[in-house]
Image (cartoon, helix red, strand yellow):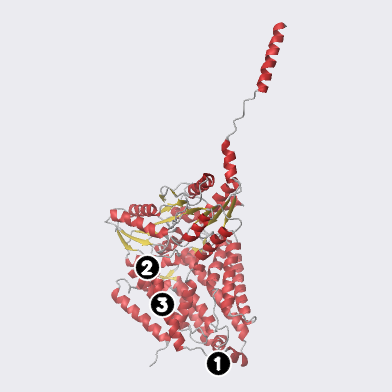
Amino acid sequence: MKYAKMLLAAAATLSISLLALPAPAQEDPGPAAYSQSLKGKRVMLVPMAMGFDLAQGWSSYIKTEVEAFGGVFETRDPNWSVEAGAQAITEAISSDTRPDVLIVHSPDLNSYARLLKKAQAAGTYVVLIDNPANFAADAFVGSDWDRLGQLEAEAVIKGCGPTSSKKVGLVQGDQVNASSLYQYAGIMKVMEKNPQFQIVAKPDSNWDATTSRNVTTTMLQQHPDVCGIIDFWDGDATGAAAAIRDAKLQDKVFLVTTGGGEKAADCDNLENGTYGAVVMTDLHHQSRDINAIIKFLLQSGQPAGTSKTYIYTLEKATTKADLKPDSCWDLKSLQTAAK
Amino acid sequence: MRLSQEQIVASIAVLIFAAASFALPGFFTPENIVSIVRSISVLGILALGMAIVIIGRGIDLSAVAIMAMSVAWYLQLLNDGSSDGAALMLVLAGVLCIGLLNGFLVAYADVPAIFVTLASGSFVFGFVRSQLITQDAVPVPSGHWLQSLGGLRFLDIPVEVFIFAGLAFLVFLFLRYTKWGRYVYYAGDNPVAARNVGMPIRPMLVLRYVISAVISLMAGLLTAASLHSINTRVVNSTLLYDIVLVAVIGGIGLSGGKGGVRNVLYGAALIGIMLNAMTIIDIPLIYQNLIKSTILLAAIIIDGFLNPRDEQTAQQGDI
C-alpha cells in the first residue's frame, strides 16, 4: 500500500505539474500580420472592357482571393472606351473609398500615364496587367509580348515546314496598342533569323473580325501560296479563319494566334482545326501572380510608386497535338461557380 | 456640263479601279472582284436601310447597335437552349419594337431623328449587353443553319453578294414603283407640303425606321453566318460612319428627297475598291482611315455646294 500511495502521489504531482506548466501553444505571428495589413483593403480592376474572356477570368480569380482576405473587390467596365476608362480611374482616385490597389489593363502606351501617376501620389499602388504602358507602375503582370511574338513566329515556321512556300502573312491589330507593336517586333526578330521565310503582307484588322476576314481574303488572293498566317488576337482571328475556310485552304494555311486560353475561344478551335497553334496566356497562373503582388504590396509598407517589378507570364504555343484537358479554362464553369 | 455628285463619285471609282487594275497585279481578277463586292455586301445592305431613312429626311444611328445586339441576343438564346423558331421570333419582335419606337418618337413625339436613334442605339447596346448576353463575342452553335448559310456559294460567289443584290433590287422596286416608296421622296423633300396634299406622313415615317431595323437584323445574321460568331464590339467601331459615308458619298443628300439605290451602289463600289486597293498596297490602317475620312469630308463639302440647304422647307432639327 505504501508503494501504491507513493505511486499515486507521484502520479498526482506529475499531473499537477503538467497542468501547471502547459507547453505554450506556438502562436504564428504571420496570419495576424497578414490579416492586419490586408483586411478591408480595396482592390479595383479597370480592364479595357469587362465583356471578354481575359477580363472575366481575372476578375473571377482576383475576387475570390481579395474577398478571402477580407478585402473589397470592385471592377469598372469602360467597354473599350479610353475616355470611360480615364473617367473611372479619375473618380476612383478622388472618391472617399479610394482603392488601395488599382489594377489597370491599359488600352495603349500613354493614355493613362498621368492619371496613374496621380493615383500613386494619392497612395494607391498601381498594377498594370497584360498591356504595358509608358509609366512606372508598382508592378507589371502579363505577357512579354515580344517573346510571345517570337513564339508565334516559331510556331508558324514549324507549322509551315521546311518544304513549304515559306511565305507568311500577318494580320496585325493596330499601330498604337503595345501588345500589337511588341508582338510584331518579336515576330520580326525570329524572321530575321530565318531569312528563307518571308512576310508577304501585314495588314491591320483593328481587332475587328470582319476586317480581318476582308484583309485575309485579299492576302490569300494576292499570295495563294501563303503557308501560314499569324493573326494578333483570337478575338478577330475568327475572321482570318473564315477567309481561309472560304478559300478552301484549311489544309494548306497554318493559322497561329494568341488568346486568353478560354475553352470556346481557343481549345475548341484548335480541336476542330480552325487554328494551327495558339500562344495561350495561362490565365490561372497569371491571376495568381496578380494576387501575389497585391498581397506583397499591401504588406510591404513601402510608399506607392517606389517599386518597379515585372512579372512575365510563362507562355507557350499549343497545337492540337499537345492539347490536354486542362490546357484551357472554361468561362462557363467559372461563371456558374460564381453564382 | 455640270457633273452631279453621283457622276463624280462614279468616275472616281472607275478611275481608281482602272489605275489599280493596271498597277496592282492580282487586282483585276474575277476572284478579287468577287471579294471586293463581298467585302462591301454587309456594309451595302446596311446602307440601303440608311438610304431609305435619309431620303425621307431622317437618319438612323441605331442601325449598327440593332444589327449586332439582335443577333448576339439570338445566338445567346440558341446557346442557352431555346428552340430556333422561338428565339428568332422573339428577336424579330424585339427588332420591330425598336424600329417602331424610333419611328414613333420621331413621327409623333417630334423628337429629332438624330437624338432618338442615338439614344435608342445606346439603349439597345446597353440593355442587351448587360441583361441578355454574357460576353462581347457570341459564337454560332455548331451545326446551326447560319454556319451552312455562310458557306453557301453559287458559281463560287458567296451568298452575301446575292442577298445584297436581291435587297438592292427590292429597295429599288419599293422606292420607284410603290406609292409609299414615291411618297418617301415627297415627304423627304418637303414634309409640310406632302402632308398638306394628304399623304400619311407619320405612319410612313414609322415604316421607314421599321424597315431600317429589319434590314439591320439581316445584315447581322449575314455577318454571323460568315464569321461563325458575332462580336458586339462592332458597335464601338467606325462601321456606323462608314454606312453614312456610303450613302452620302454616293449622292444621297442629307437634306432628304434625293437619291436612290444607284447612289448606294456607287458609294459602296468606291469604298470597296479603295479599301481593297489600299490593302493590296499594304497601307497601314491609320492611313486608310485618314484617306477614307478625307474623302467623306470632301463628299460632304461637294454635297453642300451641289445640294444647298433649302431655306424654304428647312426646319430646326434637320441634319
Give amino acid for label 3.
Thr
The picture places residue A48, in percent across and down from the top left corner, at 50, 60
Furthest residue toward left = A196
Q: Are labels 2 and 1 assigned to the same chain? A: yes
Q: CA distance from mark 1 to mark 3?
A: 31 Å
Of pointers 1 and 3, the one earlier in the residue sequence: 3
Q: CA distance from mark 2 to mark 3?
A: 16 Å
Of pointers 2 and 1, the one earlier in the residue sequence: 2
List the residue tagged with mark 1.
B312
In which quadrant will I find the N terminus of chain B? bottom left
Quarter residue B213 falls in: bottom right
Within 10 Å of the Cα at label 3, are there few (<14), some (14-19), or many (20+) other Cα atoms? few
Q: Chain of mark 3?
A: B
List the residue tagged with mark 3.
B294
Give amino acid for label 2.
Pro
Q: Chain of mark 1?
A: B
The picture places residue A179, in percent across and down from the top left corner, at 42, 58
Q: Which residue is drawn at the image coordinates 26% and 56% (left, top)?
A: A196
Of pointers 2 and 3, the one earlier in the residue sequence: 2
List the residue tagged with mark 2.
B284
Give amino acid for label 1.
Gln
Q: Secondary structure at mark 3?
A: helix
